[in-house]
Amino acid sequence: MKIARFEQGDAVRYGIVKGETLVEFSDPGSTGPRGDPNVFAVSAVHLLAPTAPLKVVAVGLNYLDHAKEMGMEPPDEPILFIKPSTSVIGPGDDIIMPKASARVDYEGELAVVMGKRAKDVSVGDAKSHIFGYTCLNDVTARDLQAKDVQFTRAKSFDTFCPIGPWVETELDPYALAIETRLNGKTVQSSSTAQMKWGVYELVSFISSVMTLLPGDVIATGTPPGIGPMAPGDRVEVSIAGIGTLANQTRTST
Ligand code: MG
């Protein structure tokens, strides 16, 4: 089931995506539509980021083929950092390129959306704590990442975390084709089978450090092919079984 969060009138609503339509329901935790559901054309609504996370926990160097590309050994434990909730934007929203950076990169990633509070969860129990999966672009000011060493500034500008277009709740996350396109040209193409730590291992590991709350997001790392964006670029992250997250870049005004 694909669940979208969208704005219609002044209200934030949730709906099930069925082809080109959205069937509204009031509570993403409920089992289905209540009463007579409203039906909208997907193209007629403003899709929002499908979750409003309190935190986005991101994983660095998790794709073996990406580590190889960087000439780096994969780390022996997952490298974690946080993207703030204020960096999250939805499908179609502008990625604003900050004046402080001369190099802003895309990083297409599979995102895990948590469904249940998770603390010290075992690998075997991880799946039952997950709501579903979506696409994420871990936008990064690469020059500031190198300059600061710490990741916080480079990863945290407003608009640096596009998420969407919706959450797929029924998906095996272990061998999904993942692709990023820049102005229509494929720049990243891999499979989640290349991850050193799979989704359930990451949920377990992260939950041993911090409590994951419903709606929180895990960005599971990026495959090879990272590169810069220019103002006016269109960037798309597609994952098999989920769909495509598309955004465009612009300079700050
Ligand atoms: Mg990343």
Image: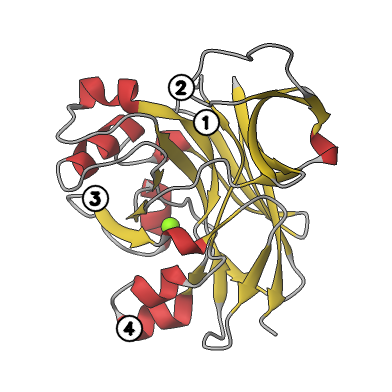
Upstream in the sequence, badge 2 or badge 4?
4
Q: Label 2: which residue?
A: 172
Of residues 25 and 137, which is closer to you in this image?
A: 25
Residue 176: mark in rendering = 1
- Tell me which image quadrant ligand 1 sits in: bottom left
**Circle 4 Cα neighbour tier, 10 Å, few/some/many (<14 / 14–19 / ≥20):** few
**Circle 2 Cα neighbour tier, 10 Å, few/some/many (<14 / 14–19 / ≥20):** few
Q: CA distance from mark 1 to mark 2?
A: 8 Å
1 or 2: mark nearer the eye: 2
Q: Secondary structure at mark 2?
A: loop
Q: Is mark 2 within 8 Å of ligand 1?
A: no
- Residue type at numbered disc 3: Pro
Upstream in the sequence, badge 3 or badge 1?
3
Q: Residue at x 48, y 50 (%)?
A: 223
Upstream in the sequence, badge 1 or badge 4?
4
Q: CA distance from mark 2 to mark 3?
A: 21 Å
Q: Label 4: which residue?
A: 148
Upstream in the sequence, badge 2 or badge 3?
3
